[in-house]
Amino acid sequence: MVTSINFIRSIKAEWIKSRSRAVIGLMLFCIAFVIAIVLVAGYMDVYNRVAISKNPWDRFFIGGLAIYILFVMAPFVILLISAIFYIEEKANGWKFMYTLNISRTQTYISKLLVISFLILVSSAIIGLLLILAGYGLDSLLPEYEFSYYIPNISFLLETITRAFISCLGAIALQFMISIITNNVILSLGIGVFTYIIAFIQAFSATSTVLYNPFALIMINQDFGAIDLEYRKYLIEGILTNVELYSILFFVLFTTIGCIYESGKNIKG
Amino acid sequence: MAHNEEQQKNLRIMSELAIQINNLHFGYSQKENILKELNLMVPEGAIYGFLGRNGAGKSTALRNILGLLKPQQGNISILGKGSVAIDRSLYQEIGSLIESPSLYNHLNARQNLNIACELRGVSRDRVDKVLEDVGLENAKGKKVRKFSMGMKQRLGLAIALVHDPTLLILDEPTNGLDPQGIQEMRIILKNLQSQGKTIILSSHLLSEIEKVASHIGILNDGKLVFEGSIEDLNELKAKESCVILKCSHVAKVDSLLGNAAEIIDKDHIKVKGQGKRFIPELIKLLCNEGVDIYEVVDEKPNLVQLFMHITKR
């Protein structure tokens, strides 16, 4: 009971802290970046994109979500965690948080949950704005016929949910790296390096792709850009091996991070 | 029976101590020990001035008390209940400000305190009260990035006070404050003491500590070299008191007084001594010996001199 109250208190405090220009700005930039590319591409490439008697929403969603999931989501995770760490580092926040009647593990997990929630919220907003962008595009270019078809909301929700699950491992890994290095620039560098490796692994379809949490984000869903040779359904239509790996990585890196943090001396 | 009485006496002393440290050792590496056999006793209700040179281990000791650093050896007892590593609920009775305060610059004073309220599990109604206590009631809506150094220190203190702790651990709280800010901080600390709070306060501003503290601990090279009340310190000061005489026949005075005297130059000599009758008796003795006295200066060491003397020993 006390533990869950502590968790709620901790999460509320993290929520207040996250109202910073860096965090909100980054979220808005990421959302605006994806939507702007979708709109510009949709506006400029209209004649290649319109297909007669096909629901335009399907292609539109796949295009928009592919941009987000393949190219934006992993860098967004790295930058968001770095921004949150930068705020904490600048505020000397750790030494205060570790002199509270809340265990270091609870503090660690609360922060991780808030970060995960912010990524989920950003993903959901992108999904919502994709629908609005479709209607917006339709008002400019009626040949798309967005208003004649119903958007496939369940596909949108499923894709976003799967993307979120497949990025949990990357969130936990980047968070753990930030905790262990205790240096924003260094953790950012390691994160970017791991992402570049993941990008190469995913696009070259190497067998090690399943062991890099950043690569899992890219190989969980079929956008027609990456060979999904190593993705398999463990429970048909419900759970893929990629999602399972991501969840296991999340648990593993969170456990390592919590153990490390619990035994750490706070010097600064 | 005698053993039981001894045990009960020890328990009573323990319960009257806000902090007791026994034989504490700590080092950042195996080669270097920052704290060596540190023993420290902070009585309840005291303002305990924790003094030491830079690098003496003051902040390290305070971080050990707060559980930010893990002691390698020794015992820490807080409010007679053990250490925070054993009983985390002790944190609810401790407020701390370690060096620079933990403040989120993008938020205002109220929001910073709201975070502390959430984390401490206290009502946000406390925010106005603590802001008033530290004199920041007119700056509650102001972003912390626009705060002066002194305002930040005061907000840090407000955060330490938000859950109304019984024990306050303040590491260099007057850092960066101007003379007026230091004076205001002194008044705040005195008020807090009058509310029954125990305050342990480290500082390198010895004169400030002397004005505010009821007890003093002097740390040198990881060991406590002096601990006691201000009265104990005054007694020690008296012991170190001396007079400087400007007189004739300095060498004669030196041979007359032996170890108590020390020649400064051909006209001046320092004579150690204390008490009300010391100066008249000394003058009478020297006059009887045919020494002409031109000037008598009564020298009582200030805390800085005493500190230098103790830490040099």
Image (spheres, rainbow, N blue to C red):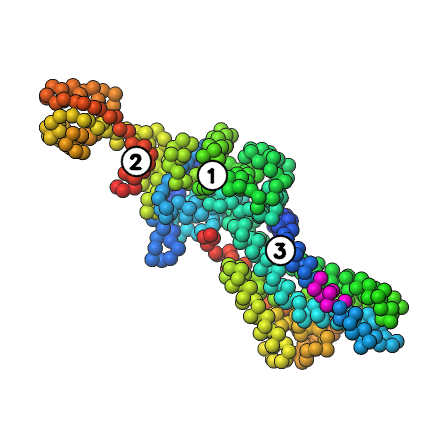
SS for tag 2? helix
* Position in image of residue A112 (x %, y %): 61, 58
Residue for badge 1: B177
Q: Nearer the viewer, residue B105 or B310?
A: B105
Q: Nearer the viewer, residue B298 or A253?
A: B298
Would you place residue B155 above or below residue A159 in this image?
A: above
Which chain is disc 3 placed on?
Answer: A
Q: Residue drawn at (59%, 70%), measured in percent from left and top?
A: A195
For residue A261, say whether it is visible. yes
Would you place residue A97 above or below residue A165 in this image?
A: above
Residue for badge 2: B306
Distance CA(mark 1)–CA(mark 3): 30 Å
Residue for badge 3: A22
State the extent of the magenta-drawn residues as a range.
A32-39
Characterize the magenta stretch by its predominant secondary structure.
Answer: helix
Nearest-to-viewer mark from 2 and 3: 3
* Badge 2 amino acid: Leu
- The quadrant where residue A25 appears: bottom right
Nearest-to-viewer mark from 2 and 1: 1
* Position in image of residue B7 (x %, y %): 38, 37
Distance CA(mark 2)–CA(mark 3): 51 Å
Task: Say whether residue A139 is magenta.
Answer: no
* Badge 1 amino acid: Leu
SS for tag 3? helix
For residue B79, say whether it is visible. no
* Badge 3 amino acid: Ala
Distance CA(mark 2)–CA(mark 1): 25 Å
Circles 2 and 3: CB atoms closer than 8 Å = no
* Position in image of residue A116 (x %, y %): 65, 60
Say which label, 2 or 1, has the lower sequence index: 1
| Residue at mark 2 shares a chain with residue at mark 3 | no
Circles 1 and 3: CB atoms closer than 8 Å = no
